[in-house]
Image (cartoon, rainbow, N blue to C red):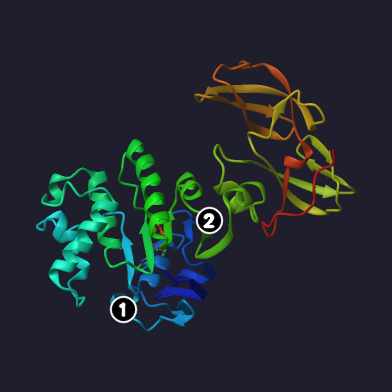
Amino acid sequence: MARIELKNLRKEWGGAIAVAGIDLAIEDGAFVAVLGPSGCGKSTTLMMLAGIYRPTSGDITFDGARVNDVEARGRNVGIVFQSYALYPNMTVLENVMFPLRFKTIERTEAERRSREVATLVRIDGLLDRRPGQLSGGQQQRVALARALVKRPHLLLLDEPLSNLDAGLRLTMRTEIRRIQRELGVTTILVTHDQVEATTMADRVVVMNSGRVEQQGTAEDLYERPATLFVASFVGSPPINLFDGHAAGGMLSVNEARLPLADPVQGAVVLGLRPESLRVNGSGDSGRTISRISAVEPMGREVLYTADSAFGVIRFLEAGAEPRHRESDDVPLGFPPASALLFDKDSGRRLDARVAA
Ligand SMILES: Nc1ncnc2c1ncn2[C@@H]1O[C@H](COP(=O)(O)OP(=O)(O)OP(=O)(O)O)[C@@H](O)[C@H]1O
Ligand SMILES: [Mg+2]
């Protein structure tokens, strides 16, 4: 187990910047998810932690000791890739034992440890099979056992669930969480799936274009997104965003005018979550008559699209049955505290609020 720190960590490929100087501290035993869109530098960061890629600049420390010059084998890091990368000609047991081959451990001891970790990940009944004779979920467990057999200081998981079907993904989310808790191993999970990140990890680090946009709990990211990027990346269906202009204590967004509780001037983006909007809510701000243009039942809630004074807006209502129909006019508003305001130029969230 180890406390991990990244200090101004940077990776360039030729002239292209994959990781643009990130700072991150991960406590011993923590489970952190790195969330971000394709190409934002998640895997590159993980590969630098594993010692597979060399940073262009910056430092990586494990328990305060700089490991930049320690090669992969010396770092004692377990890694699971999306593709599992199992050896097809070896049995499951041999696959799990493989990382111990360089260690000065007796074969019997290596086998005992491998069987122990196989029990932990619940593949003890499959040890004589070959990877080709396993389901995707079983292969995933073998890859996990292989990553854990060395009792790593740090466990790195790069999109480990993306090859599994939806049901199995749910099971494995819970399983990985259970195993991580049982071992207390510091774990970093890379994913572009916000639900996976927020359900599995204690803390989520959102990356974009090689940078850390924000880190925090799921609630921090959702309720207090630091930037427009985080606001639009976290939350499903996505937040409604409208360009507006603030002057003289009022925010103008298309046809709508909202009083502001705090002084703001200039170009502002208004963010309204689909689940914050309500029909006929008491004490709501921004109440405008909106015409519904689409009704999409989504199981336990209904998603509506409407033409409002703000522009085209989407809102959610709980319940399986739609309460409004296409072409209905509804008074749509939102609790003033739920509105998020962002500086248009910097993309950063403003502390300012809409007034009641
Ligand atoms: N070996 C490499 N050589 C050159 N460029 C690379 C290399 N590996 C990654 N890159 C570039 O670095 C950037 C970050 O890639 P990275 O694989 O870290 O993204 P990612 O966040 O893991 O994306 P994904 O979600 O698609 O896996 C990308 O622009 C990618 O093209
Ligand atoms: Mg990747």
- Residue 151, percent from left and from top: 32, 66
Q: Quadrant of the N terminus?
A: bottom left
Question: Can you tell which mark lies on residue 74?
Answer: 1
Q: The C terminus lies in which quarter of the figure?
A: top right
Q: Residue at x 58, y 60 (%)?
A: 213
Dot 1, how many residues are within 10 Å of its Cα: few (below 14), some (14-19), or many (20+)? few
**Quick one: label 2, few (<14), some, or many (20+) residues within 10 Å?**
many
Q: Position of residue 171 (x, y in %)?
A: 36, 41
The label shown at residue 198 is none
Decide which of 275, 258 is in the foreground and name it.
Answer: 275
Q: Earlier in the sequence, mark 2 or mark 1?
A: 1
Secondary element type, mark 1: helix
Q: Would you say the residues marked 2 and 1 are in contact, meaning their CB atoms lie under 8 Å apart?
A: no
Residue 320: quadrant of the picture: top right
Instruction: State the residue in front, 350 or 248.
Output: 350
Please give the residue where the numbered disc 2 appears in the rendered image. Answer: 204
Ligand 2 quarter of the rendering: bottom left
x then y, percent, for residue 227: 64, 55
The quadrant holding residue 256 is top right
From this view, report whether residue 305 is shown above or below residue 218.
above
Viewer-side residue, 39 vs 86: 86
Between marks 2 and 1 in the image, the one whose residue lies nearer the viewer: 1
Taking depth in this image into account, of 142 and 259 the one nearest to the observer is 142
The three-letter amino acid code for the residue at tag 1 is Gly
Residue type highlighted by circle 2:
Val
Q: Residue at x 38, y 59 (%)?
A: 183
